Amino acid sequence: MMKLEKHFQGSRLSVLSIANILNQPKESVRRRVQKLIDYQLIKKDTNGGLTVSENYLKLIGTFSKQTQKDLTKLLKTYDQHDVINPLIELGETAL
């Protein structure tokens, strides 16, 4: 069993539970879930529950690297314009 499968073992996520959470028709959710299965981003486990696949992790890894680069660029821009400290102070007063 792969590391990912161990983490999600016993998951009770199903098309019906997703439909209920999203307040969407079951058939619409089933079609969307099937597309994700076809794209090999999620899969059904041996008990019929839904779980993410290894392909999903590879895809998200690609996005997370780009997101990290974008966030770094944004923070550098904020730092150059002396915006970080005022944002931190604003956040602390909101708490």
Image (cartoon, rainbow, N blue to C red):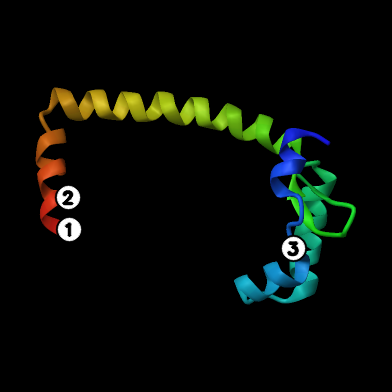
Task: Give x and y (percent) for residue 20.
Answer: 66, 76
Amino acid marked by disc 1: Leu
Task: Give x and y (percent) for residue 91.
Answer: 17, 50
For the residue carrying disc 2, how many other residues have a C-alpha within 10 Å: few (<14), some (14-19), or many (20+)?
A: few
Residue under numbered circle 3 = 12
Q: Who's the residue at 80% across and 72% down the image?
A: 27
Residue under numbered circle 1 = 95
Q: Is residue 77 left or right of residue 16?
A: left
For the residue carrying disc 1, how many other residues have a C-alpha within 10 Å: few (<14), some (14-19), or many (20+)?
A: few
Q: Judging from the image, what secondary structure is the residue with disc 1 in? A: loop
Distance of label 1 from label 3 (alpha carbons): 36 Å
Extreme residue toward the right, this view: 46
Q: Which of marks 2 and 3 is nearer the N terminus?
A: 3
Closer-to-camera residue (35/84): 84
Q: Is residue 40 left or right of residue 46?
A: left
Task: Give x and y (percent) for residue 19.
Answer: 69, 72
For the residues bearing labels 1 and 2, Cβ distance under 8 angstroms: yes
Q: Judging from the image, what secondary structure is the residue with disc 3 in? A: loop
Residue under numbered circle 2 = 91
User: Which image quadrant for residue 10?
Assistant: bottom right
Distance of label 1 from label 2 (alpha carbons): 7 Å
Q: Who's the residue at 45% across and 31% down the image?
A: 67
Amino acid marked by disc 2: Gly
- Give above or below for 51 relative to 48: above
